[in-house]
Amino acid sequence: MRPRLILAAVTTLAVAMLEAQAPQAPAFDVAAIKPSADTQAFSFSMVQPGGRYVGQNMSLRLLIKTAYGVHDSQIIGGPRWIDSDHWDINAKAEGYKDAMTFRDQARLMVRPLLADRFKLVFHRDQRELPVYALVLAKANGELGPNFRHNDERDCGKPMIRPSAVRIPPR
């Protein structure tokens, strides 16, 4: 009887020590999520010094993309309102003075927020998706007549649209 009791106590102590050592997923200390008042407003999320996370007019799809670093084509399923309903988020985490060090942690903190407030449940799945590659068509490496090499100096210039392209009004 005594050896079983000691074994049970040691096992309980070992489990408690492992749980204490297991890193906790980062989470916000305080978070408020409410439906967005202006669904026509620009959607954005940002981190601010002092551990503040602000999201404005964000759809559930955009929140998932922010939290998990995925693309639209990688999100499959979800409620009908995943794109139509928009949310404003104001959250705070203590101990982050600098916004740059908080940025990556804030993305991780959005995950438990989604699970808690939206009851988000997901699983990872491998799928075959189409992939496109832009390759040179000419064997000699020449670019076509409308292509040219670019460098970082061109990135600051305004984009020039060809006259043949028409953008329809909304």
Image (cartoon, grey):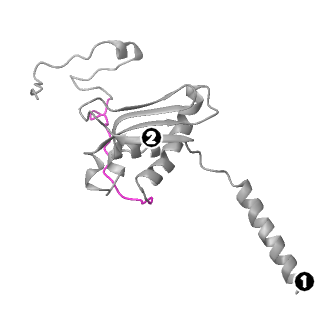
Q: Could you tell me which residue is drawn at 56 percent across and 31 percent down?
A: 51
Disc number placed over residue 142 in the picture, else none: none
Which amino acid type corresponds to the residue marked 1 in the rendered image? Arg
Location of residue 159 in the rendering, given as x and y in whole percent from the top left corner: 26, 17
Q: Nearer the viewer, residue 145 or 5?
A: 5
Q: Is residue 125 magenta?
A: yes
Location of residue 15 in the rendering, given as x and y in whole percent from the top left corner: 74, 66
Q: Which residues are magenta?
A: 123-140
Q: Could you tell me which residue is drawn at 49 percent across and 33 percent down?
A: 53
Please identify the quadrant where the C terminus is shown.
top left
Which amino acid type corresponds to the residue marked 2 in the rendered image? Ala
Disc number placed over residue 32 in the picture, else none: 2
Mark 2 / mark 1, whichever is N-terminal: 1
Q: Secondary structure at mark 1?
A: helix
Please determine whether, in this image, residue 157 is positioned above or below residue 111.
above
Disc number placed over residue 2 in the picture, else none: 1
Main secondary structure type of the part rendered in magenta: loop
Location of residue 80 in the rendering, given as x and y in whole percent from the top left corner: 25, 54
Q: Residues within 10 Å of mark 1 (few under 14, many from 20)?
A: few
